[in-house]
Amino acid sequence: MELKEYRLSRLKKLAADMGAEMIVATLPANINYLTGGYISVNQEVLTRSECAIAYLPGKDKYVYIVGYADLPTVFEFAGVDAEVYFNGGAFCFERGADQDPFVERIMNCQKLAYPTSADAWEAAIRNNLPANAAIAVDESRIFPSALAQIQSKLPDYRFLDGTALFMEARKIKHPDEVAGVERSARCAAESLMAALADFKPGMTEYEIGMSYNVELAKRGAKPYFCTVTSQKRAAFSDTTNDRVRPIVSGDMIRFDFGCILEGYCSDLGRFAVVGEPTDKMKNYYAALKAGVDAAAAAAKPGITAGELFDTAMKAVRENGIPHYRRHHTGHGIGLECYDEPTVASGNRTPILENMTFNLETPYYELGWGGMMIEDTFAMTSSGVRMLDHTTRDIIRL
C-alpha cells in the first residue's frame, strides 16, 4: 500500500469509529499527514495564521479552507479544480499577459473571498454536509475563539474534538515513514559529529550550535533545535546556547539536538568532554547508557510504554545513580518531535510493530552539570532496530 493510501485508510477507520463525516486538520503535521505533503508557509511564519484542510471519507474528497495568499500553493499542490474557501487579502495578485488556466483560476477567485475565516468554514461545511452531520476538528492549531465563532455559525452541526484521531493515526508508521525518520536521525547525528570535528577549545556553545546548523544545511535538512550546554549549564534541561563563555579543558558538554528532513523530525542526545572525563562523569554516563540499553533490550511488540519506563529507571538506579528521577524516558517521533506515546510511568499504550520512538535518560544536577543519551528506534516483529548510527560513548574533544 502506498504511503498516502495507508494514511487515509487509518484516518477513515478512526473517523468511522467516532462517527465523523468530515475530519479537519489544522496542525501543520496533521495537514501534511492528511494531504500527503501540503505546507502552508504562512503557518510557519505567522503564529496566528489559519489554515485548515477538510477531508470527507465517504466521498474521498478534500476541501481547502485557507487565506487568499495560500491560493497559488493550493492550486499548484492539488490542481486548479481544488475546492477552496478562503478569506481576506484579495487583490494582492496581478494578472500577467499570458492566458493561463492557473492564473485565471486565481484571478477569478478575487471575487469570491469570504469576509472572515468563520464564514469560509461555514460555506465549506454547508456545501458539503447536511445539517446535524458530525465534524471532527483537529484543535491543535486553531484558536478557541476562532473555533467558537465557527460553531456559532453552525449550530445545526455536531463538532467533535478530532485531535486524538490524528495522533492515533500517526502512531504506527508506513515503511516509508520509518525510512524518513531514520534518514532524519542519521542526518542529525552525522551533522553533529561533523561540527565537532572542527571544535577548538575556546569556542562557545552558540558557535558549536551554528556549526551544527551549517552541517545540516549541507545535507539538505532544516535546523530544528540544538541545545549545547557546557559545564554547570549542562544541567539546564532546555535553554539557549551561551554566546560568551568559552568552553575549555575539563568542561562537559551536553547535546540535545535534531533536525527536520523531508518533513520528518529527529531528536537525539549525546555527551562530550574536553579532555578526559572525571570518574563521576564516566560512572554516571555508564549508568544512563545502561538505562537506554536495558529498555531497548526489553522492547518487544506488545510491551507497554510504562514497562519501558520502569525498565530504564531500574537500570539507571542499579548501575550507579540510585537517586535518579525522571518524568519520562522517551516518546514517539515522526512528523513531530513528540508523537504518541510518551514513555512514562503507568502508560499502558503498547509499543507495536512499525512504531518509531526515542529512548532517553538525561541527568541534570544543578551546580555540577548534566549529561544524556537519546537514541531513536523502530519496533520490528522481533525487537527494536536503532535508527541513528554514531558513537554512543563519551565523545572526547
Image: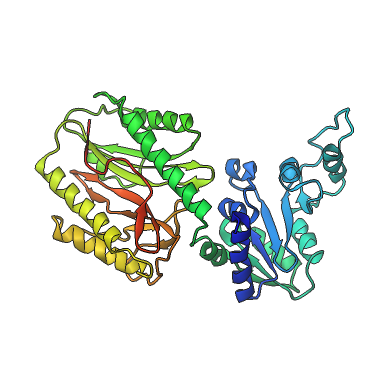
Residue 242 visible in the picture: no
For the point 80% across and 66% down, which residue is it?
A: 126
For the point 27% across and 55% down, which residue is it?
A: 292
Q: Pick the residue in front: 200 or 61.
A: 61
- Classify residue 245 by image quadrant: top left
- Horizontal side, residue 362 vs residue 95: left or right: left
**Image quadrant where one finds the N terminus:** bottom right
Placement of 134 over or under 255, stated as above or below = below
Name the residue at the left extreme: 279
List x then y, in percent, for residue 186.
Answer: 40, 41
Placement of 390 over or under 28, stated as above or below = above
- Horizontal side, residue 150 vs residue 188: left or right: right
Q: Pick the residue in front: 179 or 204.
A: 179
**Image quadrant where one finds the C terminus:** top left
- Count up the numbered dots: 0
List x then y, in percent, for residue 43.
Answer: 61, 45
For the point 34% across and 64% down, which residue is it?
A: 344
Residue 395 visible in the picture: yes
For the point 42% across and 30% down, which residue is it?
A: 215
List x then y, in percent, for residue 5.
Answer: 63, 59
List x then y, in percent, for residue 308.
Answer: 31, 64
- Horizontal side, residue 305 vs residue 324: left or right: right
Placement of 229 over or under 171, stated as above or below = above
Q: Pick the residue in front: 57 or 70.
A: 57
The coloring applied to the image is rainbow
